[in-house]
Image (cartoon, rainbow, N blue to C red):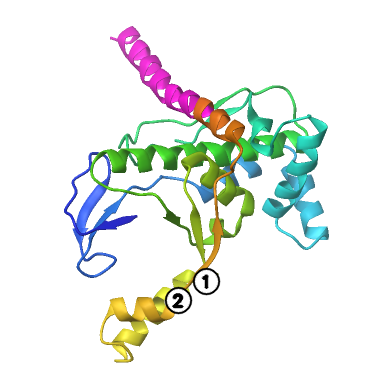
């Protein structure tokens, strides 16, 4: 979600809505149809998921934390120059529930390119990482599209459950190429409710004042300074975009065959 003083109409992006999120600002909302639910789907439908779930439970951590812990040693095992490069042969188009923005195509389908007969726990970790990257490429597509139509987005503010996932946030920073600011207060939804409650209780004269007084930035996650990481993600982003175009071509071919 992005706010602006200007009334920006952006194809494939919801809005603009006046004062819908921040008073006296126009809101545009470029969302993805599935992110957390997609990661759950990828993990839960892999044959290695029960084993990993039991191991995570025995360590009193989430399966996401366990998968994140597995990735760094795998980087060394594969002699990968950096963590993201583990997925050089695995590409994910995350449109498993359609493409909400910026293509506004509810008929778009998810794609996984690079599957093998591997059913190991390490394969699930690779597929998990590739899916995170696919989601981040989708976010990059939205940001680029919004900026091409009047926005000037150069920093992201993250909140919610996925903001607590370090790999998810770092991959987004590297792929989109801008800093991501995490809130000091982890439960940002509750803080938002407190902001509105404070205004309703006359503690502050308006939402802007309450936001300034009660909100604070926490950790800032910057993109990698390694030029190889940028080059890698630029290449994978082009593959991401081509997966969507290929899908449209395939659908057209089959539609013609059924005429």
- Please identify the residue farthest to the bottom as the structure is shown: 202
Q: Is residue 181 visible?
A: yes
How packed mark 2 is, by other alpha carbons closer than 10 Å (few <14, some 14-19, many 20 or more), is: some
Q: What element carries label 1?
A: loop
Segment colored magenta: 236-259
Q: Can residue 97 be seen in this view?
A: no
Which residue appears at 66% of the width and 31% of the height? Answer: 85
Looking at the image, which is closer to me, 253 or 237? Answer: 237
Query: Which quadrant of the structure image shows residue 88?
Result: top right
Looking at the image, which is closer to me, 235 or 15? Answer: 235
Residue 56 on the magenta segment = no
What is the distance, in whole Å, between disc 1 and disc 2 at their CAs? 6 Å
Taking the image as shown, residue 22 lies to the left or right of residue 233, namely left
Which residue appears at 48% of the width and 58% of the height? Answer: 158
Q: What element carries label 2?
A: helix
Query: Which quadrant of the structure image shows residue 207?
Result: bottom left
Which residue appears at 63% of the width and 39% of the height? Answer: 129
Looking at the image, which is closer to me, 233 or 127? Answer: 233
Taking the image as shown, residue 97 lies to the left or right of residue 55, namely left
The quarter of the image holding the C terminus is: top left
The label shown at residue 187 is 1
Q: Where is residue 211 in the image (x, y as percent from the top left)?
A: 36, 76
Q: Position of residue 63 (x, y in %)?
A: 70, 52
Which residue carries the number 2 mark? 191
Taking the image as shown, residue 237 lies to the left or right of residue 28, namely right
The label shown at residue 3 is none
Q: Is the magenta stretch mostly helix, strand or loop?
A: helix
Q: Position of residue 245 (x, y in %)?
A: 38, 21
Circles 1 and 2: CB distance less than 8 Å? Answer: yes
Give the vertical position of 43 relative to 19 (above or below). above
Q: Where is residue 232 in the image (x, y as percent from the top left)?
A: 57, 29
How packed mark 1 is, by other alpha carbons closer than 10 Å (few <14, some 14-19, many 20 or more), is: few
């Amino acid at each position: 979600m992005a706010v602006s003083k200007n009334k920006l109409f952006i194809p494939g992006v919801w809005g603009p809505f006046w004062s819908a999120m921040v008073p006296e600002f126009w809101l545009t909302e470029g969302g993805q149809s599935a992110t957390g639910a997609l990661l759950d789907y990828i993990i839960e439908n892999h044959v290695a998921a029960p084993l990993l779930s039991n191991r995570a439970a025995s360590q009193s951590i989430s399966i996401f934390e366990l998968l994140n812990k597995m990735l760094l040693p795998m980087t060394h095992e594969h002699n990968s120059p950096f963590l993201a490069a583990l997925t050089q042969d695995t590409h994910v188009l995350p449109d498993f529930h359609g493409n909400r923005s910026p293509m506004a195509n509810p008929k778009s389908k998810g794609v996984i390119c690079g599957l093998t007969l591997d059913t190991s726990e390490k394969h699930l970790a690779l597929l998990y990482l590739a899916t995170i990257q696919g989601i981040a490429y989708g976010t990059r597509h939205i940001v680029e599209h919004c900026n091409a139509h009047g926005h000037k987005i150069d920093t992201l503010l993250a909140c919610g459950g996925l903001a607590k996932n370090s790999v998810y946030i770092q991959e987004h920073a590297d792929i989109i190429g801008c800093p991501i600011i995490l809130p000091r207060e982890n439960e940002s939804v509750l803080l938002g409710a407190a902001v509105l409650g404070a205004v309703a209780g006359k503690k502050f004269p308006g939402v802007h004042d309450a936001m300034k007084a009660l909100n604070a930035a926490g950790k800032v996650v910057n993109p990698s300074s390694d030029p190889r990481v940028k080059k890698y993600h630029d290449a994978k982003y082009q593959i991401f975009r081509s997966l969507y175009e290929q899908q449209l071509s395939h659908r057209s071919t089959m539609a013609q065959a059924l005429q």
